Amino acid sequence: MTKADPKLLSRLARIEGQVRGVVRMVEEERYCIDVLNQIEAIKAALGRVETEVLKGHAAHCVAHAIKSGDARDQKQKFDELVELFSRYGK
């Protein structure tokens, strides 16, 4: 991974706050649908973070492997992506 992206860190901090909010909601025995709506919002936010991390991986790690000409590194990066996408499909 490359240098920490301030925008990504900010998103993660917001997600952390959302999770703490859900904990409070559960402790306060708030309406289930409200809790579920917040959980869905957290999942969506995590999905956006995941997309950004994947873009960064492709732009830096995978691109570096391609430019390096190192067949072993290229295969490793390709295999990692195949494994990642196979887990998404399940």
Image (tube, helix red, strand yellow):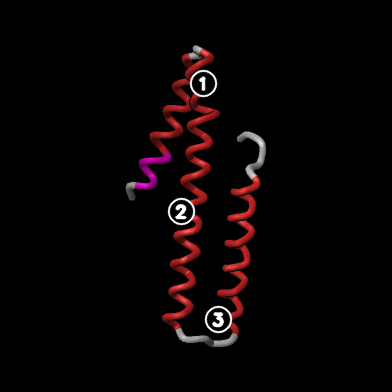
The answer to whether residue 12 is above or below residue 1 is below
Q: Amino acid at mark 1?
A: Ala
Secondary structure of the residue carrying tag 2 is: helix
Residues tagged 2 and 1 counted as in contact (Cβ below 8 A) = no
Q: Position of residue 70 (x, y in %)?
A: 51, 13
Indicate left or right for 66 with 20 as reference. left
Give the number of the disc on residue 47: 2
* Residue located 61% across and 79% down the image: 24
Observer-nearest of 22 and 8: 8
Magenta segment includes 85? yes
Q: Which residue is mark 3?
A: 26
Precedes in sequence: disc 1 or disc 3: 3
Amino acid residing under circle 3: Val
The residue that disc 1 covers is 65
* Marks 3, 2: nearer the viewer: 2
Label 3 SS: helix
Do residues under tags 1 and 3 come within 8 Å of each other at their CB atoms? no
* Mark 2–mark 1 distance (CA, rounded to whole Å): 25 Å
Mark 1: which secondary structure?
helix
Q: Is residue 49 magenta?
A: no
Q: Quick check: 68 above or below 55? A: above
